[in-house]
Amino acid sequence: MDLYDRSTLTWGQFLLWAGQQLAPDASHYHAASLFEMPPGLNTERFQQAFQMLVDRSDTLRSVFLEHEGRTERRVLSELVRPIEIVDLCGELNPRDAMRQWVSCRLTLPIKLDSCLFDSVLLKLDEHRYFWYLCQHHIICDAWSMSLVFRKTGEFYGALESGGDPGLIRVPSYRVFVEADAAARQSEKGRAAEDYWSRKLGERSEPLAFYGRRGKALPTRAERVSRDLGEGRSVRLVSLAQRQGLFHKNLHVTLANMLLASFVAWLHRVCDTDTVPVGVPYHNRTTSEFKETPGLFIEVLPVRSTMKSTDTFLDLMLKLQAETSENLKHRPYFAQNRLDAPAYEVMFSYHVATFGEFAGSRVPQEYLH
């Protein structure tokens, strides 16, 4: 805690900074997406639009430095990094070449003391571009990734239509940093810390998948996607709206259902009654924060104990009660120590959408 107390970072940023120090050249904290941009993209205007966002966003101009024994977030007064354009038109199969390029690019480290994003246009033919955008997780979460995409589109649209880019609002992340620090020093913040100190003192047995403890994994992450399909998705939504299952709103209910399914599966394959799971919360508590690029999420452990007589509904209600109780004891970002982890798996449900880019629908793919 002493290192954190001497830093100017939020707790979430500090944990990511510390994790990166353990593996300085690793890319496991990359947050990357690939966007298929609208036909006829004006690359010069796109460059201007993204630079306008960088100029307005203290998050995108942030670097993290060590100075006199403390870690500091510094905001550069200016950061100009022209968007690289990679021409793949001459390749036999430009799309395959793009995939190979992306796979290699994702392995490159992003240094915390320099530019924390990598923005590249990949040209597949004269009218078709893909936008590769990779940011270090220390300056973004899933919500922030969608904001950067949307705000760039707003600046681009204003430039294309002759509108006023000065009307586009990009709130400062510094406001959240100050509010977060004040909240943690408040009476409620100290009570939250006491609550989680007691709760995290309850140790759980390490998870053993199919009877075997997992081996240490490399830092390289692989994203595996599975589409539930329209039919299954429709049935899930219909089930979530049933009396006795519905709680607060549709997305909260779907999140509870999917978390219960995940926990039930872990209970079965790990043969354990208690399954701790790390659950991120978006933590954007004001309308201003919902428009601010940056890292806001908190991760809190949800711990459920199952009985042999429990039904799926019983499990759902237990998890619902646990998550509701967790939200009463914030702000907090749970430590996940190597010697005594609070959780070994995470469950994330997010509904951040990327929407349109200057009025055009843009297919988006999470890469990392």
Image: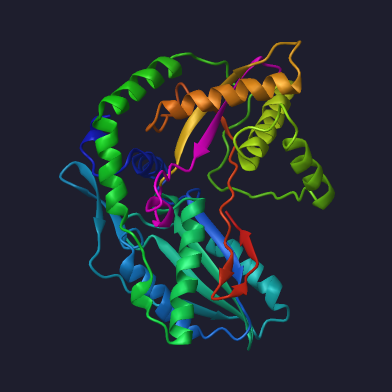
Q: Position of residue 80 (x, y in %)?
A: 32, 74
Query: Could you say which is closer to the camera, residue 343 or residue 212?
Result: 343
Residue 320, placed above or below residue 12? above
Task: Look at the image and tell me whether residue 81 can be seen.
Answer: no
Magenta stretch containing residue 284, yes or no? yes
Q: Which residues are magenta?
A: 271-295
Q: Position of residue 171 (x, y in %)?
A: 33, 59
Residue 208, placed above or below residue 79? above
Identity of the residue drawn at 69% across and 74% down = 95
Identity of the residue drawn at 60% across and 68% down = 35
Identity of the residue drawn at 49% across and 39% down = 281
Query: Could you say which is closer to the camera, residue 306 or residue 163?
Result: 163
Residue 93, placed above or below residue 236? below
| Quarter of the image with the N terminus in it | top left
Residue farthest toward the left in the current orientation of the protein = 68
Left/right placement of residue 39 relative to residue 55 reads right
Query: Could you say which is closer to the camera, residue 346 or residue 45?
Result: 45
Q: Position of residue 47 (x, y in %)?
A: 44, 79
Magenta stretch containing residue 239, yes or no? no
Q: How many marks?
A: 0
Q: Quadrant of residue 358?
A: bottom right
Task: Look at the image and tell me whether residue 141 can be seen.
Answer: yes
Residue 167, placed above or below residue 347? below
